[in-house]
Amino acid sequence: MNAIVEINDLTKQYGQKKALDAITFKVKEGGCFGLLGPNGAGKSTLMKLLTGILSPDSGGMTIMGMDARNNRNAIISKTGYVPQEITLFETLSARRNLVFFGEMYGMKGEPLKRKIEEVLQQVGLADRAKDAVGTFSGGMKRRINIAASLLHDPKLLILDEPTVGIDPQSRNHIFEMIMALKKKGMTILYSTHYMEEVEALCEDIAIMDNGRVIAEGSLNGVLEAHAAKAIYLESDDVTVPPVLEGIAKASAKGRGWMLESSDPLALMGRLVQYFQSKGIHVRSLEMMTPSLESVFLKLTGSSLRDE
Ligand SMILES: Nc1ncnc2c1ncn2[C@@H]1O[C@H](COP(=O)(O)OP(=O)(O)OP(=O)(O)O)[C@@H](O)[C@H]1O
């Protein structure tokens, strides 16, 4: 694997609080890597270490083949970072804001002008270029922040929970933009506590909880290894779950039952036969798609959704 980021045994503590506890994983070059975890898991801390805003207590990071300890400027020149907090000048227009950020990267003149128009197109705000950022919605401001991070053509883009608190239209724009950037070969490190986003955007993931990586690998690999396999059953005639070979666990869910099984296909056959032989009317019998929700529940005992 050609890794663009390698994180080895990284630890960071704030006073007594261990925000990162011996984190180790690799991000391969190209595609979107999802960092999934509830609030306080340590995602922002990790991103701040990767961008040199914070220093680790121990452990190492190699980014684009460079040791992060002594190549900070070279790494920053090839990395785009969008923090959770919006950092824009409210009274300046979108375009003026981008001029400011472009100049910080040492860009100027015609190349900067051209690049600004390009990134405004990329985030879908070219028609609002002249308007003061203070008149924008939260989602539009976030998109301008993302545009600013793209001006210097980074190889690696780090997005810290970019869709928190924004409107659905901006969320769609961000998703489409990520798909387009992936096609161009950029690597995106995307943190979120929304598993649906990771499932939609990312090929590889690390699930974090309490400063630790609790699962890591390809999205499909993590689902295969940890997700509950289950069949959903709904029937007015079934008041207690059937006792059949292959049902590892049965629990009430909505108006029906969730029947977990290591071999749901075989169980499905058995259930169909059983209900037919008993003449029981079934409203729904459905093989559940493995989800990251069940992975998180299995590995931590709590639901990511409740955060
Ligand atoms: N500057 C700080 N001083 C003290 N504790 C901190 C500081 N920054 C973060 N923490 C704590 O470190 C832990 C990890 O925080 P971090 O912000 O990295 O998590 P996160 O996964 O990004 O969550 P969030 O989505 O809430 O930002 C949390 O318990 C948090 O309260």
Image (cartoon, rainbow, N blue to C red):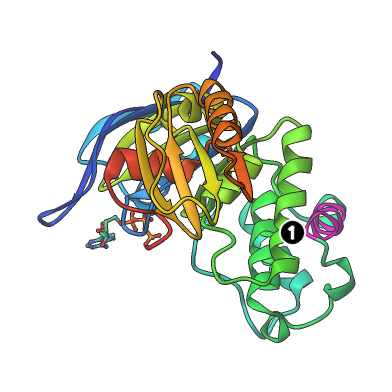
Q: Residue at the spot x=75%, y=67% of the render?
A: 169
Left or right of residue 66: residue 23: left
Query: How many numbered badges does the structure rendering display?
Result: 1
Q: Can residue 32 be seen in this view?
A: yes
The residue identified by callout 1 is: 172
Q: Can residue 6 be seen in this view?
A: no
Label 1: how many Cα within 10 Å (few below 14, some 14–19, many 20+) = few
Left or right of residue 178: residue 261: left
Extent of the magenta region = 112-123
Q: What residue type is labelled 1?
A: Asn
Element at badge 1?
helix
**Quadrant of the snapshot with the N terminus:** top right
Main secondary structure found in the magenta portion:
helix
* Quadrant hosting residue 128: bottom right
Left or right of residue 186: residue 196: left
**Quadrant of the snapshot with the C terminus:** bottom left
**Magenta span contains residue 121:** yes
Q: Which of 133 and 33 is in front in this view?
A: 33
Q: Residue furthest left?
A: 16
